[in-house]
Image (cartoon, grey):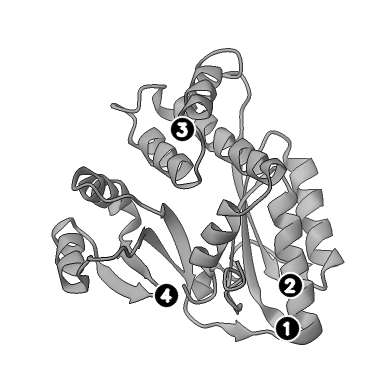
Amino acid sequence: MSGHSKWATIKRAKGKTDAARGKVFTKIGREIAVAVKLGGGDPSTNSKLRDVISKAKAANMPNDNIQRSIKKASGELGNINYESISYEGYGVNGVAVIVETLTDNKNRTASDVRHIFDKCGGSMGTNGCVSYLFDTKGVILIEKKSGMDDDEMMMTAIDSGADDFNVSDGLYEITTLPSALSQVREALESKGFVLAGAEVEKIPANTVDLSGADLEKFTRMLDMFDDNDDVQDVFHNANLPDEGDDE
């Protein structure tokens, strides 16, 4: 995906060390906690929880971990309140960056996010300073397997309620309205498709090329955000090389 390289991110996540996977599971656990808080611990009546469970499975999170997270959120951890806060700013060479967080201490998180921007040659801005450069879409990814027909897949996606469909790098990328993501995801899963990802994404209208030292600084920024437990996702308009090519 232009400016976000989501498939590269997924491939990199699958190859991570156990410690790094544990960090990913911790972040998904927070999303589960928020979903349970909003709609209860029964996925059959909580569409947001179903969405997060689908995300957890795409990240290879074991079912035992998922169920444990739901039970914790329903029980003793139910009193922990995570607040969703987005930060906007600029990376090197004016790259637009949106950082989405779930935090139980917004002062700590704001300080951490600002520090990462500053440390990597960027700057944190005000709300709205770059969000206008992005469109918000539901994005579903399905890995193209041998024998799958592109035209058939496109018709299946459109019939399921998708807005658009693209094939790239061995991947079907299906876009929806944010409000239709759950419906389309469930329709595709009911037809037996295994999803590589299904999330609301911010898609940049234009991208910025980076190379050399600028690319190194920006990649370091993304790694630092990735290492921060409060940061759930980062969207940007840098046109990065596919980090999954050498795996």
Q: Among all residues in the image, which is located at the extreme top?
A: 76
Ranked by sequence position, the earlier of labels 2 and 4 is: 4
Q: CB of mark 2 within 8 Å of CB of mark 4? A: no
Residue underneath mark 1: 93
Residue 109 x, y percent position in the rendering: 75, 45
Of the residues shown, which amino acid type is indicated by label 1? Answer: Asn
Of the residues shown, which amino acid type is indicated by label 3? Answer: Ala
Residue 80 x, y percent position in the rendering: 63, 24
Residue underneath mark 3: 35
Q: Which mark is residue 120?
A: none
Q: CA distance from mark 1 to mark 2?
A: 9 Å
Q: Establish if 156 lies above or below 71.
A: below
Q: Nearer the viewer, mark 1 or mark 4?
A: 4
Q: CB of mark 3 within 8 Å of CB of mark 2? A: no
Residue density around tag 3, few if under 14, some if 14–19, many if 20 or more, within 10 Å: many
Q: Which mark is residue 218?
A: 2
Residue 211 x, y percent position in the rendering: 72, 86
Residue underneath mark 4: 169
Of the residues shown, which amino acid type is indicated by label 2? Answer: Phe
Residue density around tag 4, few if under 14, some if 14–19, many if 20 or more, within 10 Å: few
Of the residues shown, which amino acid type is indicated by label 4? Answer: Asp
Q: CA distance from mark 4 to mark 3?
A: 32 Å
Q: CB of mark 4 within 8 Å of CB of mark 3? A: no
